[in-house]
Image (spheres, rainbow, N blue to C red):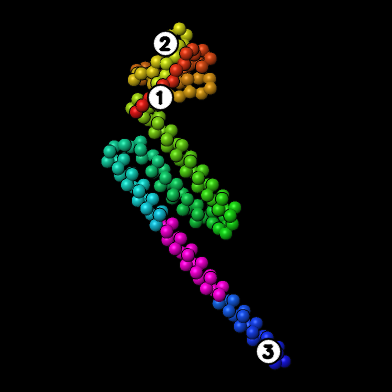
Amino acid sequence: LISIIFIIYLVDEKITQEINDNKKDLEALKHRTEKTKQKISRGGWILIILLIFFIIVDIIFANYIGLIFPIGFLVLIIINRIAEKTVLKIIINKDSILSFIIYFGLQILLLFNLLTISTSIENGYRLRYQSKQSKLVCFYYNGKTIKTSKKTIYVGETKKYIFLFDKENEETLIFKTDEIKDLKFILKNN
């Protein structure tokens, strides 16, 4: 009976020691998690301050088309925070690697779409109103030489068509690539 009591005492002491060690490990993990959350929070605030700085600079220099990306990014941050507090909190388990991949993939997808849309709008604006074309084009079409200039701007192309914009007549010119001869693209140095 004394041996059993002694063994129980030793086992109880060992279990108590393991529980205390686990509590210390848990406290250390909580401390590291809190530090990481604080760093992420600081980084988020720095990002928001930078975006606001870019918005102010664009407003000061009257570059209103340049406001699309920073304002869109701020809207995405707001949408993300609302989604984190509501829908994503229910759907995504924070302890799962699959949940992290889904969450991270969603963020990258939203950012990529914003970047694509804002870049397209800015390029279209610069092309339309500032005549900043990326390529100079020269080709023969139906016996005529077609060349880009300040009045005729290269807009873009597909597999079957090349699009130019005539600023004087404010019309889009469409040329079938099958009927084009001696097509030359020259990258424009800005």
Identity of the amino acid at label 2?
Thr
Q: Secondary structure at mark 3?
A: helix
Identity of the amino acid at label 1?
Leu
Measured in 3D between alpha carbons, the distance from the residue under mark 2 to the one under mark 3, in whole angstroms, is 105 Å
Mark 2 or mark 3, earlier in chain: 3
Circle 2 packing at 10 Å, graded few (<14), some (14-19), many (20+), is few
Q: Position of residue 26 (x, y in %)?
A: 53, 70
- Residue 182's place in the image compared with 123, above or below, is above
Q: Position of residue 156 (x, y in %)?
A: 45, 24
CB atoms of marks 2 and 3 within 8 Å: no
Depth check: 26 or 17 in front?
17
Q: Which residues are magenta?
A: 21-41
Q: Secondary structure at mark 1?
A: strand
Q: Which residue is mark 3?
A: 5
- Residue 48's place in the image compared with 143, above or below, is below
The secondary structure that most of the magenta stretch takes on is helix
Depth check: 34 or 11 in front?
11
Q: Position of residue 104 (x, y in %)?
A: 52, 49
The residue drawn where x is 37% and y is 30% is: 125
Which quadrant, please, contains the N terminus?
A: bottom right
Residue 106 showing in the rendered view: yes
The residue drawn where x is 53% and y is 47% is: 106
Circle 3 packing at 10 Å, graded few (<14), some (14-19), many (20+), is few
Q: Which residue is mark 2?
A: 145
Identity of the amino acid at label 3?
Ile
Residue 35's image quarter? bottom left
Mark 2 or mark 1, earlier in chain: 2
Q: Which residue is mark 1?
A: 187
- Residue 92 left/right relative to 153: right
Between marks 2 and 1 in the image, the one whose residue lies nearer the viewer: 1
